[in-house]
Image (spheres, grey):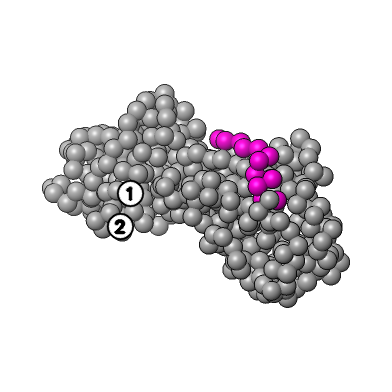
Amino acid sequence: MKDVFDCVVVHYGEIGLKGGNRSFFERKLIDNIKLKCGDLIKSCIRETGQITISIDEDVDVDKLKDVLSKVPGVSYFSFAKRCELDIEKIKECALELARGKEFSSFKVETFRHEKNFPLKSPEINALVGEVIFEGLGKKVDFKKPDIVLKVEITSRFAFVSCGDVAGVGGMPTNRKQRIVALLSGGFDSPVAAYLLMKRGCEVVLVHFMNQNQMSSSVQDKIVRIAEQLSKFQLHTKLYIVPFEAIQKEIIMKVRSDVRMLVYRKFMLRISSAVANLEKAKFLVVGDSLSQVASQTLENLEATYDGSLKPIFSPLIGWDKTEIIALSKRIGVYEISCLPYGDCCSFFLPKHPELKSSSGLLKKFEEEFDVDALVKGVLDKVKIVEF
């Protein structure tokens, strides 16, 4: 039997703690839901303690579920049936919804967002539970029920649902909060970018491409990662930066054990230039402390020093197991597993420098016309938008 949903009840977490600014974030979340869901929904409004989305009965539930679960700011949601604020109507609605489910045991949970409703939550639970017990012959189980029927009371309607769907959580995307994330083909940088998307930032992605990488399969991998990440924000822009010319200069002028660090200094400089173009205030990197040679405390200090933009490093205290687990959850793991060698993996020394210094790297940087090299690659970037 087909479910009888006519709406989706959306709940948020942190937004509810914003006090006087709460309405601003609620409106922002509603706007974002409308933009991401498009024709999948009819309307989206604020109700008491929730956001309510109206849908057609023939909506593609799986598609809507996939889109809505990736909207930052949405903590969880449930497909629901709306009914009048009348206990008899609520009981009818709950019975109709339960008939479409296969289960042996159940319980009822009521949330009164509107306290003026004449019946309290335990009374509603008992009355709705009684009609399910008598009408369908199902048993009540408060500890491990097969299903949980949820009743939510607002100022205008009651909503009956069965089963919550987890969302991203965090804060709704604000396109004025724009930042630039360095994106490689590995596991770490996509996860770092996602974490800032979850905090409400619009993330512009920058990838550095070596000529040795220039095959359709490698470029396709980066585009696929960016496309998957684009599901978590309203608009995504990917800059593909040709890095070969700069890399050749570095190979000629910098000793092998610190080349990686000079690569990274240039990448931060170019990314800062992209940030200026995009009116972005911060850079995001996927560094995890001591995971590889370039990420020792000393080398991070040396490479970050002198950056033209402040740097976020959201994975700095994460280990690889945690990073991969989140990579799987957001759908980039399988793509990141594809064969790939990024710019920094070419011409790696057997014994890279583990304890560099800002002074040492600055000395090598003086060998280059940095501004000219940066301008040269920016004139040749490829931009992909989603």
Percent across and percent down for residue 88 are: 19, 36
Q: Is residue 356 above or below residue 79?
A: below
Considering depth in this image, is 352 or 1 the residue closer to the camera?
352
Which residue is tagged 2?
A: 18
Residue range corresponding to the magenta coloring: 373-386
Circle 1: residue type = Phe
* Res. 269 visible in picture: yes
| Residue at position x 59%, y 63% in the image | 307
Disc 2 packing (10 Å; few <14; some 14–19; many ≥20) = few
Viewport quadrant of the C terminus: top right
* Residue 81 x/y as whole percent: 31, 34
Q: Choose between 225 and 74: the one closer to the eye.
A: 225
Give whichever of discs 1 and 2 has the lower sequence position. 2
* Image point (56%, 60%), residue name: 308
Pointer 1 with pointer 2, Cβ within 8 A: yes
Residue at x 31% of width, y 59% of height:
17
Q: Quick one: 177 or 190, which is closer to the camera? A: 177
* Residue 258 drawn at (x, y percent): 78, 67
Q: Report the side of 113 relative to 303 (left or right).
A: left
Q: Residue at x 42, y 30 (%)?
A: 38
Question: Considering the numbered disc 2 on the image, is that residue within a helix, a strand or a loop?
Answer: loop
Asked if residue 292 lies left or right of residue 312, the reply is right
| In the rendered image, the vertical position of residue 306 relative to residue 347, given as above or below | below
Which circle marks residue 25 in the picture?
1
